[in-house]
Amino acid sequence: MRQVWQAILAPWQTLPARQRRIITWGVGILLLLVFPVLDRSLKWQTLNDVTDVLVLVILALGLNIVVGYAGLLDLGYAAFFAIGAYTTGILTWPPHGLEWNFWVVIWAAVVVAALCGIMIGTPTLRLRGDYLAIVTLAFGEIVPIVMRNLGNQTVSIGPWRLMENFNLTNGVQGLNPVGRPWIGGFEFGFDPAPWYYLILLIAAFVIFANVRLQDSRLGRAWMAIREDESAADAMGVDPIKTKLLAFALGASFSGFSGAFYAAKLQAIFPELFKFNLSIMILCMVILGGMGNIKGVVIGGMLIQLFDRVVLTQTTLIARGVGQTLNIAQLATVDLSLWRWFFFGLAIVIIMVIKPEGLFPSAARRAELHEEVEEQEAGDDK
Amino acid sequence: MTSSNGVVLEARKITKQFGGLTAVNEVDLVIRKGTIASLIGPNGAGKTTFFNMVSGFYRPTSGQMIFQGKETNGLRPNRITGLGIGRTFQNIRLFANMSALENVLVGMHCRLTTGWVGALLRPPAVVQEEARARRRALELLAYVGLEGQGDTIAKNLPYGLQRRLEIARALATDPQLLLLDEPTAGMNPQETVDAMALIKRLRDELGITILLIEHDMKVVMGISEQITVLDYGTKIAEGTPEQVRANPRVIEAYLGKGVAYALADTGGAGVYGTP
């Protein structure tokens, strides 16, 4: 068996590294492009789920800029996703009478999300570490509640009625329907393939932006601030401005996915953007490896794979086993209700065994492993 | 840029109070272009507090700090760095998990112009700027004796080289005035001699004015042209190494009153050793 493998791999390994990279990338991109065809002909019916997974991966990549690059712990990132989605909903919901073109709206969502990032960042980014985490946590709680309560507002000062039954977000029911994208005469509908290609395009752009930003003057400034904010300040890096840019750029990426998600789901309501979502995105970043683009992408996919495939399949298996062995608890079990238990468990295990994540960036690996070695050296004494 | 009389840094009755404690009390200091000046004094004399006021980490309670004719009171550290004051730290504060080259490149931050749009689109101007910055950073690494160490993670460098990297990073900010906070602390005698030679080269070859805090009297007496002595936040003496060494108030501050009288006749040689 081993010899067979070697015989297959030998010509591959003789190729120059550059050619190997081009071929790997080429095959990868080709696979992504023909995936809808494969999916349809093989009757996998996974395209819709894969599209949703990519939405979350894009969110994880946006959060990676804030948490991974600049080291700012943001516990309310879903709020920016909500803002992107609601911007899209408000500008396209028919009762509002606006019904803007989706291709304009998606950019509006990006700009609004970035502006909200700056708005929440300006007063709070002077705070360090834990304090910022608490502020973002609160922000993440505030946004869905504001969206819920902006359904029917009457504002009056004395005799003046400024607003009467003003309905911006349609409260708990949410906005439904949301405007779909058009290309020429073609409207995106129930066929998942066009959505898949659109999100693939957005994902490609977001990954490209992550790569470019990381290896730039700005990316270095973010890492310097993560390492030692005062020293970075003394080296001429303006900490407030730099952190604000991380917040705004991170938020703008969630604007993309928010707009896409709203249009695809055709309905948005406050329940979609709860604290759990922020934590799930954060888990993706931490599990994969903060600051590493490949790690964040794979980490995000693993968590989603677990959530959507492993949990449902094991539920079916467990029920089967329960029925054959006649164990009532097992026969009616629904493991997907236990997803947060498993996420929590996974994070605990990762933090204990591999705190730098599955695919760490070089800097994180250096950081965490050195400390372990130092500790061990200290223990010997 | 430089004012006509060649003064780089001037402190006028600069004072810093922390609550009821006066850490630096009405200190006047003038440093001329091209000087190597030292700030000495017993522990807790206010040297580092003074440094932090020059570099913008503390805002003076009263008095004026003037750098090249411009008042810097209340400016943030990154602005002051932009004006041309570089610094190192007493306990090394490198970006420990970044490579040596990246550390130096961060130092160049305020001399580069690429914003987030430039980083995303990467037009030719940005590519050229990055290439220039990298070349310059490698030159600086070589200059302080870190040739070929560009890819080493900063914290994996030996102690003496970390001190040098901190100097390279400060040089990358393109300073007129360089503040060195105990540049030879923790070094062995050979490393200390090398560090002194490097500091001299910075002034002689690059024309950078230098202000340093140092406890090692061999270093202070060996390279400084101007020494200012602080004690309990007050300036008690100033002058050339010879003048300061013979000053009874200085000996008193370091060793107490009795010893000061006993040693006054020897010109302080017993206290400081020979340069």
Image (cartoon, rainbow, N blue to C red):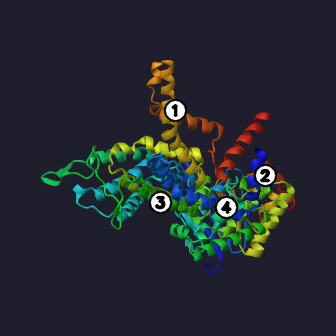
The numbered disc on residue B186 is: 2
Q: Earlier in the sequence, mark 4 or mark 1?
A: 4
In the displayed structure image, the side of residue B198 where residue B125 appears, left or right:
left
- Residue drawn at point x = 75 percent, y = 58 percent: A13
What residue type is disc 2 on? Gly
Asked if the residue under mark 4 is in contact with the one under mark 3, i.e. CB atoms within 8 Å, the reply is no
In this picture, residue B256 sits left or right of residue A39: right
Between circles 4 and 2, the one closer to the viewer is 4
Of the residues tagged 2 and 1, which is closer to the observer?
Answer: 1
Pointer 4 and pointer 2 on the same chain: no
Q: Which residue is disc 1 drawn over?
A: A314
Q: Secondary structure at mark 1?
A: helix
Q: Amino acid at mark 3?
A: Ile
The disc numbered 3 marks a residue on which chain? A
Q: Quick one: label 1, few (<14), some, or many (20+) residues within 10 Å? A: some
The quadrant holding residue A20 is bottom right
Please determine if labels 3 and 4 lie on a single subunit.
Answer: yes
Amino acid at the residue labelled 4: Arg
Q: Which amino acid, mark 1?
A: Thr
- Judged from the image, the secondary structure of the residue bearing numbered disc 2 is loop
Helix or strand or loop: what does disc 3 sit on?
A: helix
Query: From the viewer's perspective, is residue A260 above or below residue B222?
Result: above
x, y (%) of residue B201?
79, 71
Viewport quadrant of the C terminus of chain B: bottom right
Residue that numbered label 3 is attached to: A202
Q: Can you give x and y, in whole percent of width and height, for residue B249 in the image? A: 74, 57
Does residue B228 appear in the picture of this structure?
no
Q: Nearer the viewer, residue B212 or A286?
A: A286
Q: Earlier in the sequence, mark 3 or mark 1?
A: 3
Total marks shown come to 4
Where residue A374 sits: x, y (%)?
A: 74, 41
